[in-house]
């Protein structure tokens, strides 16, 4: 076969996590690999009941095409929730419903990126954001981070010196993959720098509601006086990911551009899924549901940290996240997390080697541990095994 694929296909590789997930779907594997929520917390009974109500009350409307922007009551709920929790000032016309927040990232590429444009991101950053943006032919510059988030002097240095910067992509709360959270000060500073240099910020926030401890922090958008910050959000971690309902929020004139490109992509999101979520939010107490999720994940996180402290060698670094789904481990520099993974897979344990999360630089001594998807006993067994394997490498 001689097939002429588009040039962009040479930039697109199979996601390592997706490939790994094929292995980890097997029942007997203990997986810390995917970012999967705990399935036992999905509100199955409630969804079943609400589904019937929606079909009874809305009938064919729930199965018909609808507007690209999305179901109005759902957009109203999202705007109101963001204003209360994140300090934004949105109404429903600031919100576009997307197929998961992942689609919001892809549409951002479509709206903003030409070939050769530059995206700035944290180092490391969310793997599937790298894939989404890369398809539009961009280059990445990684900005170093510390415990408070992106280092602003390093960011300003790059902003001053580099042409063609189109986007700054950040996950400031319980970041994937590191679990880190930006301080208030850094959020303010990023809003100031994006206004000063006229650069769009994509503030990706799928985990913000899953806080175990510490004070909630306002969104970068809440410090933005010019409208350069776009926020993405998602029902995947607070409801269920299978509905594929997320959103992007921002200045109305920019959201209108997203609406235009979404029309060419898929016309709209699933009508009945949007209605079911909106009706669920009306009939049930989502805060109570989130409290239950947070309780389970906090416990799992505590066990994961306890096991890392107990079974991993002493000379490693790791994050103890205040929320979200992940912790990040840095091994001594000469150790390859890929080799450790191979040995662990032989013992039916999986995690993601950290180098996948760097668009340019590779830190082979890092790994990401997801703690939300496994029951407590398996977290203990799995991390003990990973610890044993790492110890063999540290000693040999
Ligand atoms: N952003 C980040 C940082 C993520 O970790 C994920 C996946 N969990 C997404 C976006 C996409 O999530 P979804 O499409 O399910 O909303």
Image: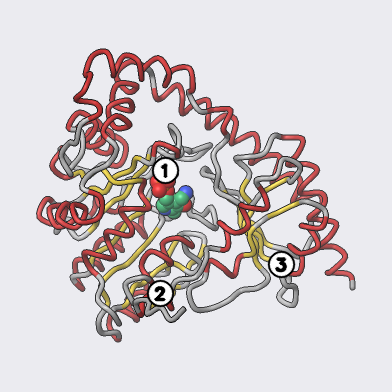
* Residue 16 visible within the image: yes
Q: Can you name the residue that lies furthest to the front here?
A: 1
Judge by depth and name the residue closer to the eye, 330 or 372. Answer: 372
Q: Is residue 66 above or below residue 98?
A: above
Where does the image place residue 334, in percent across and percent down from the top left? 74, 77
Judge by depth and name the residue closer to the eye, 56 or 274. Answer: 56
Q: Earlier in the sequence, mark 1 or mark 2?
A: 2
- Compute the Cα span from label 3 to label 2: 34 Å
Q: Can you name the residue that lies furthest to the left here?
A: 253
As helix, strand or loop, the secondary structure at mark 3 comes to loop
Q: Are marks 3 and 2 in contact (CB under 8 Å)?
A: no
- Numbered disc in front, either 1 or 2: 2
Q: Is residue 321 above or below residue 257?
A: above
As helix, strand or loop, the secondary structure at mark 1 comes to loop
**Residue at figure coordinates x 38%, y 60% from the top left:** 170
Where does the image place residue 393, in percent across and percent down from the top left? 84, 69
The residue labelled by disc 1 is 208
- Judge the density around disc 2: few (<14), some (14-19), many (≥20) Cα neighbours within 10 Å: few
- Judge the density around disc 1: few (<14), some (14-19), many (≥20) Cα neighbours within 10 Å: many
Report which quarter residue 345 is drawn in: bottom right
């Amino acid at each position: 076969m001689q097939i002429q694929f588009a040039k962009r296909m040479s930039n697109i590789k199979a996601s390592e996590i997706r490939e790994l997930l094929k292995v980890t779907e097997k029942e007997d594997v203990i997986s810390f690999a995917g970012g999967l929520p705990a399935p036992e917390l999905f509100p199955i009974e409630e969804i079943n009941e609400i589904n019937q109500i929606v079909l009874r009350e809305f009938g064919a409307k729930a199965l018909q095409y609808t507007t690209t922007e999305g179901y109005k009551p759902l957009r109203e709920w999202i705007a109101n929730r963001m204003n209360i929790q994140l300090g934004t000032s949105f109404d429903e016309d600031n919100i576009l419903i997307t197929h998961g927040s992942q689609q919001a990232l892809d549409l951002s590429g479509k709206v903003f990126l030409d070939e050769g444009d530059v995206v700035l991101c944290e180092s490391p950053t969310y793997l599937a954001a790298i894939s989404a943006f890369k398809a539009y032919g961009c280059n990445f510059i990684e900005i170093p981070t510390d415990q408070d988030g992106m280092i602003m002097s390093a960011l300003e240095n790059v902003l001053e010196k580099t042409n063609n910067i189109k986007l700054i992509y950040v996950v400031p709360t319980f970041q994937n993959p590191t679990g880190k959270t930006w301080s208030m000060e850094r959020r303010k500073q990023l809003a100031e720098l994006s206004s000063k240099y006229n650069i769009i910020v994509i503030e990706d926030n799928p985990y913000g509601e899953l806080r175990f401890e510490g004070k909630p922090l306002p969104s970068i958008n809440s410090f933005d006086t010019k409208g350069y910050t776009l926020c993405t959000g998602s029902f995947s971690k607070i409801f269920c990911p299978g509905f594929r309902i997320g959103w992007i929020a921002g200045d109305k004139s920019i959201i209108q551009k997203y609406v235009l490109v979404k029309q060419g992509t898929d016309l709209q999101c699933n009508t009945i899924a949007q209605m079911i979520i909106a009706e669920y939010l009306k009939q049930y107490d989502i805060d109570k549901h989130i409290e239950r999720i947070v309780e389970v994940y906090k416990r799992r996180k505590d066990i994961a940290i306890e096991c890392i402290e107990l079974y991993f060698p002493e000379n490693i670094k790791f994050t103890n996240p205040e929320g979200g789904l992940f912790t990040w481990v840095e091994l001594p520099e000469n150790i390859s997390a890929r080799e450790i993974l191979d040995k662990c897979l032989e013992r039916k344990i999986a995690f993601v080697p950290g180098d996948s999360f760097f668009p340019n630089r590779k830190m082979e001594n890092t790994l990401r541990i997801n703690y939300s998807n496994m029951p407590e006993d398996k977290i203990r067994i799995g991390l003990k095994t990973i610890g044993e394997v790492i110890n063999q490498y540290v000693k040999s």
